[in-house]
Amino acid sequence: MPGNFETRSQEINSLKESVREYVKTSELFGEDEFFRTLHQTPLVEKPAQESSDKKARLDALYGKYAECKNCPLGNTRNKIVFGMGVLNPDVLFVGEGPGFEEDRKGLPFVGRAGELLDKIMASINLSREKSVYIANIVKCHPMKNPDRPDLRGNDRPPEPSEMAACLPILEEQIDILDPKFICTLGSVSTKALLKTEDGISRIRGRLFEYVSLSHKKIQVLPTYHPAALLRNPELKRDVWEDMKLLQNLISQTL
Ligand code: URA
């Protein structure tokens, strides 16, 4: 019967879709494969409009904190990791703090988690060269053992006092950059920016409001930290959902 046949083929199609989804999220694919496979969305790129005013303000902010010793992290860092990206970002991604690689290079997210972040961004056609800015809550490397800056795996999350000392820099950066959206990566940055105690698995994928120093309201989308995805690839499915939402929001602003 035609009715039955249609129902059956709908069922088969939906089954195929589920299998495709499963394969995408399964550990058969490495983390890089996962986000590359999902690179299926149309390009939504805008030329970065250089703003000399923004650049001057950011440069001045950098100058003000280049030798910062407002917390003990300033005594052990190799390089301050101020941030990088475009001056008119669609999205400001916010991590927690520099790790070993970042401390050496002076750039955010340049280790394994950073490679994955690049792929996550690329899956919705975002990149640090063209459309985003990347910064952290703290600008200097928090270490478990500050006497061994030469050791890998010596990273730790920033202390509340370190975050409190450093947050004014990020607040200024947000004010200057005026991003269309903010995406906090992981619970540390989400809690610090949104002043919430809720865990990341509870609030990821939902939109919150951040009010900038000049009283501008900016929507914030918390998602998992890429380092969490390296430990637990199951979380990639949720991050992909969050990225689709982000891309949708950006496209509504074009
Ligand atoms: N993790 C972060 O939160 N920030 C970085 O810059 C690198 C790793």
Image (cartoon, grey):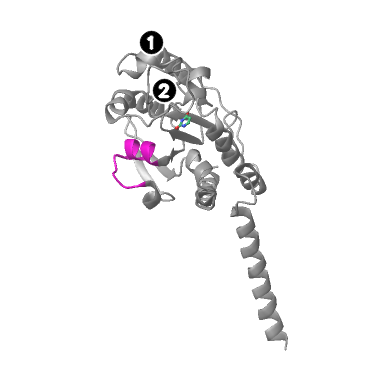
Q: In which quadrant of the rendered image does the N terminus lie? A: bottom right
Query: Mark 1 is on which residue type?
Result: Glu
Does the segment drawn in magenta span residue 188? yes
Label 2 beta carbon within 8 A of ligand 1:
no
What is the magenta range? 187-199
- The majority secondary structure of the magenta stretch comes to helix
Residue 184, horizontal then vertical, whole percent: 42, 39
At x 30%, y 16%, the residue is 70
Disc 1: which residue: 67
Q: Left or right of 192: which side holds 236? A: right
Q: Is residue 69 above or below residue 220?
A: above
Q: Is residue 5 above or below residue 182?
A: below
Residue 158, horizontal then vertical, whole percent: 35, 29
Is label 2 in a helix, a strand or a loop? loop
User: Nearer the N terminus, badge 2 or badge 1?
Assistant: 1
Viewer can see residue 119: yes
Q: CA distance from mark 2 to mark 1?
A: 14 Å
Displayed quadrant of residue 140:
top left
Q: Would you say the residues marked 2 and 1 are in contact, meaning their CB atoms lie under 8 Å apart?
A: no
Is label 1 in a helix, a strand or a loop? loop
Residue 61, horizontal then vertical, whole percent: 39, 16
Disc 2: which residue: 141
Query: Mark 2 is on which residue type?
Result: His
Label 1 beta carbon within 8 A of ligand 1:
no
Q: In which quadrant of the rendered image does the C terminus lie? A: top right
Q: Left or right of 56: which side holds 165? A: left
- Towards the viewer: 42 or 8: 8
Per the rendering, the mark at residue 160 is none
- Towards the viewer: 36 or 152: 152
Residue 100, horizontal then vertical, whole percent: 48, 24
